[in-house]
Structures are given as C-alpha cells and as structure tokens.
Amino acid sequence: MIKVGVNGYGTIGKRVADAVRAQPDMKLVGVAKTRPNYEAEAAVRKGYPLYAAIPDKSDAFRQAGIDLAGEVDDLVLQSDVVVDCTPSGIGEKNRELYDRYDTRALFQGGEDADVVDASFNARANYDNARPDDVRFVRVVSCNTTGLSRLMAPLQETFGVEKARVTLIRRGGDPADATRGPINDILPDPVTVPSHHGPDVNTIFPDLDIDTVGVKVPATLMHLHSVNVTLESEPTTEEVRELLSDESRLFLVPGVAGIDGTGQLKEFAMDTGRPRGDLWENCIWGESISMEGDDLYLFQSIHQESDVIPENVDAIRAVMDAADQRESMERTDDNLGVGL
Ligand code: NAD
C-alpha cells in the first residue's frame, strides 16, 4: 500500500486526492490546505485528514471549527510520496521540505523541468521515473500531456518528421474569477514559437516540434490545431485506427453530434463523470485527415483533469510499484478512463 499525501488542494490537488482514494494499492494519508475555505470544508466532508500547509495559520482552521490532523510536516513524514499541487513556483520552494523527510515528491507542470529528476508522461516515458535515484518527478502540463499522448503512438508507428501545433488556450479555469481575457483574442505568447514545444521536448528530446499559443475568453477546455508531417504516408483510416486503440485518446464520433467543448463537457456530465472531467484527449474524429504525408486534426484537452491519471501512474512509477502497462490499466480501470 503506497501512502500518498497531497500538498495543495485546489483544481488539481482535489482531483488527485479523489483519484488516489480510488486506487486499492494506495492510501491517502491526507491533504494540506493553506486556509479553511469551502474546499477545506469539502475535504472534511469527504473524510480526508486535513493538515495545515502553513503552520502559522493553524489557528484559522480551529476558529473556523475545522479539526486538523496536523501540520504539513506531519503529512510529509507519514507519506511515501507527496503530490505537490501548489501554484506554479511554490513547488520548487517545497522541495526542501520533502528532502528533509526523505520523501519522494511529484510536482506539476507549472514548475520548471530543472526542479526535478525527471519529467513524466505515462504513455511516453513511464520508465524514466522508475530508477531508485529518481526522487522528484514533474507531471508535465495539461497541454504537454495532451501532445505527448498523441505524439507517442504517431512516433512509434509512422515516425514524426515535424510537428506544428497551434494551442488555443482557455483564459482561466471555471472557478477562477481573476483570469481573462473576457472579450479579446490574445496571441499568448506573442513571440513565436511558444514555450510549449520545448516543454514537449522534456518528454521527447529529439522531436522536432514548433508551437504557437492563442488565449481566448473560454474556461472549459483548450483546443489544439495539430499538423504533423509523418515519415511515412498512412491513410486517414490507418491513423484513425492507431489512435482509437489508445485508452487515453477519445475519438469524438461525428454521429454523436457534439459540436464543441461545451457539448463535450455536457456529455461528460451526462455520463456521470465526477466534476464533468474528461481525462482523455478528445480528438475530433472527423478532423483526422492525411494530405500526402501531412496529418491534420483537432483535439480538445480538459485542462483540469487530463493530468490526473498521469499523477496516479507517476506515483507507481516513482515508487517502482508497477510497470507501465500494469499501472496504466489499473489507473484506467479504477477511475473509469476510456469513453
Ligand atoms: P489552484 O490555484 O487551483 O490550486 C493551488 C492550491 O494550492 C490552492 O488551494 C492554494 O491555496 C494552495 N496553496 C498555495 N500556496 C500553498 C502552499 N505554500 N502550500 C500548500 N498549498 C498552497 O492551482 P492548480 O490549477 O491546481 O495548479 C496547481 C499546479 O498544477 C500548477 O503547477 C499548475 O501549473 C498545474 N496545472 C494546472 C492545470 C490547470 O489547468 N488548472 C492543469 C495542469 C497543471
């Protein structure tokens, strides 16, 4: 039984905690929060032991009538691995805390790659997190996760000569009241290429990929417009078959009549997905097209949830508790991944 702590209980942290609880080979030791807000209250109602992320603020929890199981140091000490889900840049500062207790830790995509021993995507490089001297692992961002899941089978089967991707990014998460734009379309970053390509190179060092980014007034998902020049010339049907065999790629069928990310999310909620989460890349089946050796497609990425199965697999990888296939199958079964 792998003992897991979650430090930082926001968009990603609460989903990781629920996903860990769903794994029979893992035990959720508890979650650390900075303040006693509605998310702390929800964690208590779920029965998650709550730890004060900032010891000086422990009193605020008591004043709010919330019992604490301890402070973050206690959580780290009791855990085999901590999943750090704090905002970008805080994880790096927390590294020393995990070092102090000799506890392994996962970080999220907001941290720089040089903070960790390995960047991780379950489908593409699971084994990079397994060696005993790998203690700190970064589960790459939602966009890099989505691109890695797509590039891995293309690379293995057809070879990738060059990938070009336009990332049309949501302005903020649905509960994020401070992000935007609310009435604009922003080249973001305005410089070309964007940093997303180099981030994909932390998973595929030799992949030739250029990316550009645009930010739009939307909260539900990102949309990638993908062009990959392949080293061979498969038919559209061969590409479709390859991608449909991947458990974390969902080919949105034309017959479903789903016309955008709003209806995709509605489908997720109608099918009983927790929080309407879409853990899979949602590739628009009708968009998959081969023109000579150029592949084109659109894929939508649910930024709040596609990294969740990856975090679960990264826990097993960094603990060397299962091989890639076994872990991904277990994660998918336990969560219900695969639409
Ligand atoms: P969030 O703001 O929703 O949640 C972060 C939580 O950490 C908040 O509850 C905050 O109060 C808490 N926190 C702040 N300082 C802390 C500290 N010192 N100790 C413990 N907790 C602290 O952020 P998020 O969207 O969940 O992002 C977390 C990480 O995941 C970032 O690296 C981000 O880049 C990455 N990520 C986010 C998304 C996304 O779309 N939301 C997708 C993939 C990866």
Image (cartoon, grey):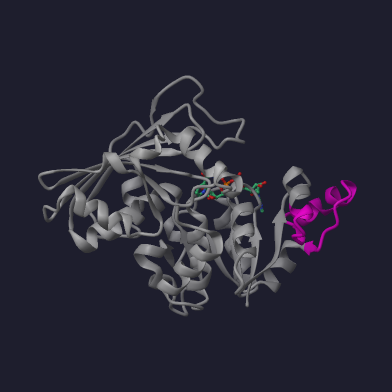
Residue 115 visible: no
Expressed as whole percent of the image width and height from the top left, the position of residue 95 reads 57, 63
On-image quarter of the N terminus: bottom right
Task: Tell me where the magenta segment starts and ends, as one range.
Answer: 43-70
The residue closer to the viewer here, 48 or 265, is 265
What residue sits 59% from the left and 58% below the top?
84
Does the magenta-highlighted stretch encompass residue 163? Answer: no
- Give the residue displayed 63% in from the left and 58% down from the top: 18
Task: Tell whether position 50 is magenta.
Answer: yes
**Residue 159 x %, y %:** 18, 59
272 above or below 311?
A: above
Asked if residue 245 can be seen in this view, the reply is: yes
- 136 with respect to 285 (left or right): right
Image side of residue 86 versus residue 171, left or right: right
Image coordinates of residue 188 in percent, x first then y, are: 39, 32
Report x, y in % for residue 32.
Answer: 71, 57
